[in-house]
Image: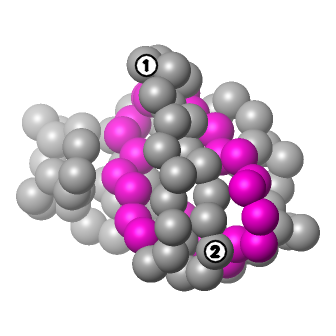
Amino acid sequence: MDSLPQGLRREGCTPAFDENSLPASLQSRHALPPGRWGLLRVAEGQVEFEDLTSDASRTLTAPAEHVIEPESPHRLRLVGPVRLHVEFYVSDSPEQG
């Protein structure tokens, strides 16, 4: 998915992480809960996003964004210096998500 669905509102954001502060939990298998979307924003450097459902990976080079779907197992892999954060979005509508 290239963009967030319509009708979502921003619910929060992680702090900015770099290659030294990126939590181990983001570098291992994890997924967002139902109804919660993520938008990974790479401000500097590169990171690899691994979709563990399809075994596809994508190297994101700044400036870059990547939509993270709810309940989709994934992880991040460091490939060098990086600065990134993740924004979280939810819907007010029960049908969305």
Kindly indicate the quadrant of the structure image that contains residue 94.
top left
Q: Is residue 36 visible?
A: no
Is residue 83 rendered magenta in the image?
Answer: yes
Q: Quadrant of residue 95?
A: top left
Q: Amino acid at mark 1?
A: Ser
Residue 54 is labelled as 1
Amino acid of disc 2: Gly
Q: Reply above or below: 89 against 28.
A: below
Left or right of 79? Residue 13 is: left
Question: What residue is at 48 percent from the left and 44 percent from the top?
Answer: 58
Residue at 51% x, 20% y: name it: 55
Numbered badge on residue 20:
none
Q: Residue at x 34, y 70 (%)?
A: 10
| Marked residue nearer the N-terminal end (1 or 2) | 2
Who is closer to the viewer here, 97 or 47? 47
Residue 84 placement, left or right of 26: left
- Give the answer, above or below, for where 50 lies relative to 20: above
Q: Secondary structure at mark 2?
A: strand
Q: Is residue 79 above or below residue 74?
A: below
| 92 relative position to 88: left or right | left
For mark 1, does the 10 Å Cα neighbourhood hold few (<14), some (14 to 19), or many (20 or more) residues?
few
Q: Position of residue 15 (x, y in %)?
A: 67, 77
Mark nearest the camera among 1 and 2 is 2
Q: Closest to the observer: 10 or 63?
A: 63
Mark 1: secondary structure: loop
* Residue segment shown in magenta: 64-86
Find the distance from the CA under tag 1 to the CA under tag 2: 25 Å
The stretch drawn in magenta includes residue 68: yes
Q: Which residue is mark 2?
A: 45
